[in-house]
Structure formats: C-alpha cells, structure tokens
Image (cartoon, rainbow, N blue to C red):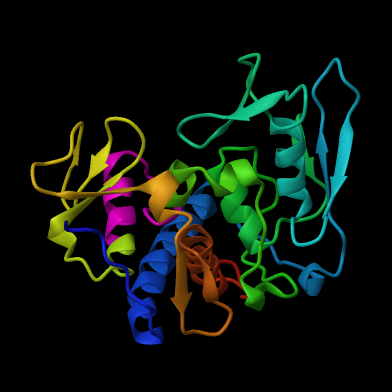
Amino acid sequence: MPRIRWKASLSAQELAPLVAIAEQSIIAIQAAIQQHRPFVRYHAGGAQKAETTVNWPPAQPEQYSTHMQMHSELVAVAASTGGATPIWALNPAGHVVANNGAAIGHANYFTDLPHCGYCTVMVWVLDLPLGAPTAGRYNLAVNLDYTVPANVRDNVDVLSRLFNVNAGGDAALIVLKGIVNAFLQTPSTDWVLQIGPGIFVSDTAVTPAAPAGKLVLDWATEAAPHQVDVREMYFGRNSLLITLWKIVWKGIYENVGQVRPIPA
C-alpha cells in the first residue's frame, strides 16, 4: 500500500531554499513593523534584563522576567494565556486576545527595554502592543533556541504566517506544505497535508476533502512530531515542528544584529 516516504536527512543545500523563504518573509514583516513604529538601537546585546508587565484590572500588575531561553515578552504571554484562570488566549488565527473581549492596549502589556529583533517579530505576529522595536540580536541567538510558549509553538497559524509575511489563510498553509515537501521523498503532487478536520492542503489549493488518490499526511499526529535530521550546524535531529521553528529563527538571525534601523 502506498505511504508517505520521508528523506533520511536534509542537506545544507536542501535547507538553504527554506531559510531563504523565511528570510524574505521576515524582511517583509520587519518592513511592516518599521512603517508602524521606527526601529531603535538595541543596546548591550541582551546583557540588560528586560521586564514585561501585564496590567489587567482588577488584578494587580504582574511583572515577568526572562526565564531560560524564553524572553520576558513571551513569558508574559505564557502566563497570561495559561494556568488555571487565563486572562488571555491564543485565538484560531494565532493572535493573543482577551477572554473578556476587551482590547489589549499598551497600558496592559509593555516591556521596559527595547525588544530584541526576535521579540519584535513575535510580539507583532501575535498582535500584541509593540514597544520599542529593534533589529537586535540577543546573546546566544546563533543557537537557534529562542523559546516560545507551547501554545504558540504548536499553533500552525502562527508558524505558517511567519513563512508568509504574516499573512494567514490558505496561502500561508500552501507555503507551509511547500516547505514540508522538502523533507519527503514522496513527490509533492502525490500527497496533501491535513490541518485538522476538513482542511487538506495541496501545492496549489486548500480543499474540504482530500483529492481522490492522494496520500494524506496529518499535521498534528504525523508531520509535526516526525523526527527529521538536518545536516547543518545548530539544526541536527529534531521533530519537524522544532526544525521548522529553527528555520524561522535562522531567517530572523540573518536579518538582525544591525546597528542601524531597517530601511522603510
């Protein structure tokens, strides 16, 4: 019986076009941010410890600091969208929203120092109030281990938008499917990627049912957890999901570290 066949490993040459997709998306996202708020200089390469405050009355303000490789901006997201009584949630589109329907403004979520280049992108993509954006490269960024909360990591809409200039919907899922193609021996036209019930992604379209005769690869149970081996420094062997996030981090890494603002 035909089945999906994975490559044993991915070479640096095969990885390069995927990183290029991420890079071009990040460049466009940074340009959109620059139009919204000018970039500032990133000081000390992350040696200073930022603190992010969530102020959501009637509760008292809560301050969050960087923990391990999760920066304070994302620690605040994890705390506010998790736990026993979350005040916010990650909606189906991959945006942080308040559970009571109120808008989340700058008085509700703010960081005391400029965001690093990674947090700049992630705060923007999560649709949270942006503080001072930068193209700064934090210490140890080369390891491609920038950490996000599990609900962000596992959200296919967030991930696919990062590869598609922050635009979601069918187009982003088609881009994601094209990236997964690179890890398979099975010809791209022979299979579709299933993203939940009634969402089947081919190279050109998203349909409510799998086209006849096509192999189906389920994102959550088969694709995302599948172990892949990438023969490139700082990649190695990880789940496909973690590998795709590393590609995003590599795309950001190649476009941060500048001492000048990004041109509009």
Viewer-nearest residue: 226 or 131: 226
Along the horizontal axis of the image, is 43 left or right of 100?
A: right
- Residue at 39 percent of width and 54 percent of height: 223
Horizontal placement of 219 versus 237: left or right? Answer: left
- Foreground pick, 261 / 148: 148
Q: Does the magenta stretch include residue 176?
A: yes
Q: Residue furthest right?
A: 60
Q: Quadrant of residue 199?
A: top left
- Where residue 18 sits, quadrant-wise, is bottom left
Q: What residue sits 79% from the left and 23% below the top?
A: 56
> Can residue 37 be seen?
no
**In the rendered image of this protein, does residue 143 appear above or below residue 98?**
below
Residue range highlighted in magenta: 162-178
Query: Which residue shows up at 40% across the image and 60% down it?
Result: 25
Residue 226 screen position, x and y as percent: 45, 60
Left/right of residue 3 with respect to residue 68 in the rendered view: left
Relative depth, front residue between 36 and 128: 128
- Left or right of 154 in this view: 203: left
In this rendering, the count of numbered labels is: 0
Q: Which residue lies furthest to the front in this view?
A: 1
Query: Which percent across, then down, holds residue 225?
Result: 48, 55
In the picture, the quarter occupied by the N terminus is bottom left
Residue 130 image position (x, y, % from top left): 65, 44
**43 is higher (above) or lower (below) than 31:** below
Does residue 258 belong to the magenta stretch? no
Tell which of 119 and 155 is nearer to you. 155
Q: In this view, does 264 lie above or below 65?
A: below
Q: Is residue 29 above or below residue 92?
A: below
Residue farthest toward the left in the current orientation of the protein:
212
Q: Is residue 198 visible?
A: yes
Q: Looking at the picture, how far across and down is residue 49, in whole percent?
A: 87, 60
